[in-house]
Image (cartoon, rainbow, N blue to C red):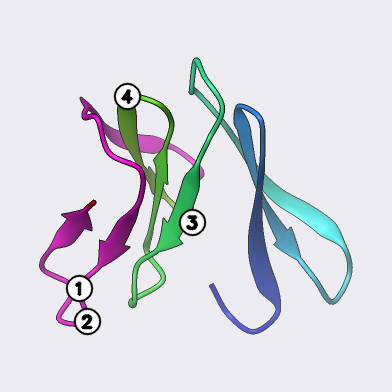
Amino acid sequence: LTLQQFASGSEKTIRLWDDHNLINLHKFIAHESEISNVEVSFNNQLLASISTSTLKLWDIKTGLMVGSRNFHCRSCFFSPNRNLLILL
């Protein structure tokens, strides 16, 4: 994300916004339960979202889901070296 973009989550949907023009750039829909955490990678290429039992990875440029795994965790963080996604 750049300084002119931000992500927001509500229930089962994540939206990527251009905050300068208030334009919805992408709408990420795939979770079956409420989203508890959204994290953006340091290189601004991936967005990770967590619901009750699912982790999903999204390509920010295309808005497409690039991965999904069943995990029981509450939050996640991308490592600064961009090699790891840390699950808590």
Give the mark toward the camera: 3 or 4: 4
Note whether 35 is above or below 46 in the view shown.
Answer: above
Please state if 60 lies on the left or on the right of 55 as rendered: right
Mark 2 and mark 1: span between their CA atoms? 4 Å
Name the kind of residue labelled 2 in the image: Pro
Relative to 78, say whether 36 is above or below: above
Task: Tell me which segment is drawn in magenta.
Answer: 62-87
Q: Which of pointers 2 and 3 lies earlier in the amino acid sequence?
A: 3
Contact between marks 2 and 1 (CB within 8 A): the answer is yes
Please name the residue shown 70% across and 79% down the image.
Answer: 4
Amino acid marked by disc 4: Ser
Q: For mark 4, what is the residue?
A: 53
Q: Name the residue tied to disc 3.
A: 61
Please report contact status of discs 2 and 3: CB closer than 8 Å, yes or no: no
Q: Earlier in the sequence, mark 1 or mark 4?
A: 4
Give the residue drawn at x 44%, y 37%.
64
Residue type at numbered disc 3: Lys
Front residue of 61 and 2: 2
Location of residue 72 by image quarter:
top left
Q: Indicate the position of residue 62 as horizontal and vertical percent values.
A: 48, 47
In percent of width and height, residue 48 lies at 38, 49
Q: Nearer the viewer, mark 1 or mark 3?
A: 1
| Residue 80: mark in rendering | 2
Q: Which amino acid is tagged 1? A: Ser
